[in-house]
Image (cartoon, rainbow, N blue to C red):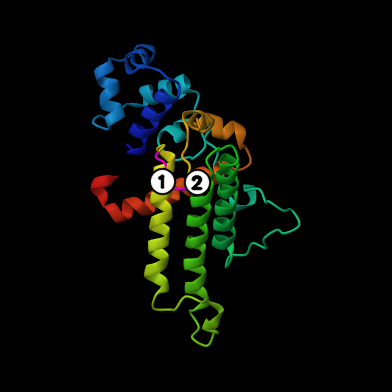
Amino acid sequence: MSTDFARIMTLLRKERKLSQKKAAEDLGISQGLLSHYEKGKRECGLDFLLRASEYYGVSCDYLLGRSPEPGGQTITVDEIPEDDPNQRDKVTPNTVIIAFNKKLIGNSLNVLFSLLSRCPSKTVVKETSEYLMLAFYKVFRHIYSANPKNDQNFFTVSEEMAPAATDAAMSLADARLGCAIKGRENPGEDALSKQGLEELTLSTQTLGEEFPKFYSSLVNLIKNSENHIKDVCGDDNR
């Protein structure tokens, strides 16, 4: 059974603020067995999979990690909404992956910046934006510099300094963001307050309800990213 099953079972229970004991009673099994399921130590049978699906109101495919949508829907390029209907991608076999990823990233950014708009910490907004802009800069410079004939005077940071300096700037933005998120103020910066944390109370259910057009894109981006991370970490971290 997919290792996603254990993670999703735990996530659904915690989102609904259910104790493991209560969920086990409702599902007709012992707390110990449910604990084994949630830790991935035991595989459940089809009967339990169906019961859990009905109990949490999600599809079996979602529980098994085969669908990013709780209802079990799949996502295609044509189903991902455009930000601007007047600027539609012309999808061909050669450009489908570009069109797909462009929409996933763009729609996910819509969710991210919508969440930032309710964030009272200027540091969180600033460092998040700087990190993303630096990531774009790094990739764009790779593409621009692929052809040595392109005028490198377009950039003011030297070719020798740019890679390491960009990574350093991204690491610093990431560190400042992490401090602000955890409520730690650095000189000249603010941090996220307890009230600000409440504004960012999230779950798969609330995200789906608040961003119905973009939720599928967000879930697919997260799933794709974590697959890449697992490839780097190795099978032991799956």
The amino acid on which the numbered mark 1 sits, given as a three-letter code, is Asn
Looking at the rendered image, the quarter that the N terminus falls into is top left
The residues colored magenta run: 184-188
Mark 1 Cα shell of 10 Å, populated few (<14), some (14-19), many (≥20): few
Q: Residue at x 70, y 58 (%)?
A: 88
Q: CA distance from mark 1 to mark 2?
A: 10 Å
What kind of element bears circle 2? helix
Looking at the rendered image, the quarter that the C terminus falls into is top left
Relative to residue 126, is residue 163 depicted above or below?
below
Residue sitting nearer the eye, 89 or 189: 189
Q: Work out whether residue 210 can be spotted.
A: yes
Relative to residue 154, is residue 29 depicted above or below?
above
Q: Residue at x 55, y 85 (%)?
A: 151
| Residue labelled with disc 2 | 123
Q: Is residue 71 magenta?
A: no
Relative to residue 47, is residue 86 depicted above or below?
below
| Front: mark 1 or 2 | 1
Q: Position of residue 165 (x, y in %)?
A: 40, 68
The numbered mark at residue 148 is none
The amino acid on which the numbered mark 2 sits, given as a three-letter code, is Thr
Residue sitting at the far bottom: 149
Q: Position of residue 41 (x, y in %)?
A: 23, 31
Q: Quadrant of residue 25?
A: top left
Secondary structure that dominates the magenta span: loop
| Residue labelled with disc 1 | 186
